[in-house]
Amino acid sequence: MSAPTWTPAVRRLGAFEAHRMLRHPAYPIAMLYILTWAGTLLVNHQGGTPANGAYMVVSSSLLLVYAPVTFVVTNRVAAATHRSRVREVLDSVPVDVRQRTLGAIVGLMRGPVVVGLAGAALLLVLGRFVTALTPVAGDRVYQRTVLEYLQVPAIVLGAGLLGIAVARWLPWPGMLPLTTLVLWFGTMATYFPFTAVSQSGGPEVVHARTWLSLWPVWYASDQGMLPRQPLGQEMWHLSYLLGLGTLAGFAALLRAGGPRRALFVTAGAVVAVTAAAAWLQLG
Amino acid sequence: MTDIRLTAVSKSYGRRRVLNAISLEAGAGLLGLLGPNGAGKTTLLRILATVAEADSGGVHLLGQDAADPLPRVDIRRGLGYVPQETGFPSGFTAFEYVDYVAILKEMTDRRTRHDEVRRVLAVMGLSQVARRRIRRLSGGMKRRLVIAQALLGNPRLLVLDEPTVSLDPEQRLRFRDTISALAEDRCVVVSTHQTEDVAAFCPRVVVLHEGQVRFDGAPRQLADAATGRVWIADRRDPGARLAWRTGDGPLRQVGTPPPGARLVQPLLEDGYLLLVDAAEPSAEVTNR
């Protein structure tokens, strides 16, 4: 019999880890980049109307900057307390490595994911605001549903969980940039079929495979926006994203030792749901 | 009450047997652990700290079996551990590091925990640098920081692996004072290469060599084992196994004295040297 995984100490640890993540120096650097970019757009009068530009800045900052940086941040935070010489002290305390991994996951959800949720809410409001103030129909951004906007924090959650999983499974130097490259090229491979069609000047057609990695599609047209996902499919894409992220979380917990049967059973169910969601979103 | 009960504990790394059927009992008080490099001290302390598991034998700590997962968590609730070598998570201040360990020691109430963190930092003289990043602390301060985290929650069992490394003489004396006071009502195991530390504040010493207990008793008994075998002379005598020049001038020699030699009162280190040297006849330390 093993000790319970979820304890008040894990909850408290989650608050501590959230604080560590949000204070990580990668975020201010990313923010500086975003501000510089936004300033450039403003000075050069790019991005359509100011409201349209603001929408683009917020949405692309969340998806193209904040989510990848969250991957790096959670990886660094989870890895910092997992190195062998650091662990020598930590392995002699009541809260074990699985609970510490769970603490990092809770920290992710209490910190970076909350910011992602706030960003999604801001996008929702901004989207309405933009449409109302943009008289020329061609400049209007395409309105998205709540389920589509919720894909933003879902991607942040998935990126963060993947960062923690990489910290647990690949704790060696150089693994973080290598994993980043693999993710980058993997996304490009999914994205490529759509880009080819778009650059040909033909009608904007979304290749079926692109829906597996939908977020680049948001920025694939000249205005930075594409038509919404077909109605009824955004829920499946959200489920698919959440499923992928949850599987990364399971992977991190599986590496942390302790009883695994319940984890394997739950992970199996999540694999089934994620595969079904992936299939359904392809229509 | 017996806080430590080891029964025929063995541990191997690959083919190398590091601990060989060690049995040991200890209750409240200070126990000094001496031994040459590779004697198995750190492995023994890691087992006592529940960081490593024995291959065979029984390990009972604070009245519970350390091999069972649930009792092991209970043991850890009453344990403080200072490893021989420690790294620190990057970006932490001294306060944050101890606070982090305090959370892992299940101190969930924020105010109580912070009071406790401030207390242990004050005990180790680190209050002034509590908000300083760990990477900016000196080696001695980092060592005291590791000791500070071990004191969190007044543990019933303290396992300290070479805690005085990097400490300056004043800090070492302060450390002796702190640990001696703590050992009044709890079990403290201290491993060290500093025989003077053991002689100064440990009522009991265990000498470990090649994975076995070679001596278990009072420091005075270990020193007395060298009675009649320590002498001083101006030149190195043929019977000296070990000899070194003292600050006063003559050579202090340990071994088989010549007739009429000027015998002196042996120290703990003399007994220790003879004990270890007897096991390794080829070893010879000279400083003529």
Image: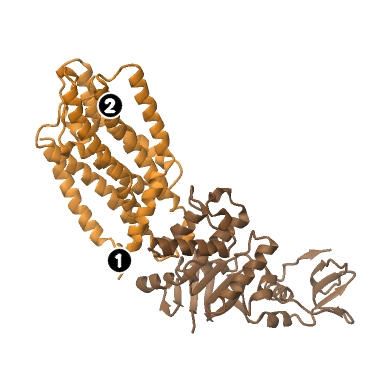
Chain colours: A orange, B brown
Q: Residue at x 28, y 60 (%)?
A: A260
* Residue indicated by mark 2: A54
Q: Which residue is mark 1?
A: A4
Disc 1 and disc 2 on one polypeptide chain? yes
Q: Is residue A36 left or right of residue A278?
A: right
Closer-to-camera residue (A203/A51): A51
Residue A214 seen from this side: no
Mark with earlier residue (1, 2): 1
The residue located at (37%, 28%) in the rendering is A35
| Relative side of A188 to B278, left or right | left
Query: x, y percentage for residue B45?
Result: 53, 69
- Circles 1 and 2: CB distance less than 8 Å? no
Q: Nearer the viewer, residue A189 or B98?
A: B98
Image position, residue A229 (x, y; %):
14, 31
Q: Against B136, is B222 above or below?
A: below
Residue at image location 64% in from the left, 67% down from the top: B174
Mark 1 falls on what kind of element? loop
Task: Tell which subunit mark 2 falls on.
Answer: A
Q: Is residue B27 left or right of residue B253?
A: left
Of marks 1 and 2, the one in the foreground: 2
The chain letter for the residue carrying disc 1 is A
Residue B203 lies in what quarter of the image? bottom right
Q: Could you tell me the amino acid type at mark 1?
A: Pro
Alpha carbon of mark 1 to alpha carbon of mark 2: how far? 47 Å
Q: Is any part of residue A238 visible from this angle?
A: yes
Few, some or many residues within 10 Å of mark 1 (<14, 14–19, 20+): few
Residue B64 picture location, percent across and down: 41, 78
Residue that lies at the very extreme toward the top in this rendered image: A201
Classify A131 as above or below B30: above
**Regarding mark 2 in the picture, which secondary structure is present there?**
helix
Can you tell which quarter of the image residue B121 is in? bottom right
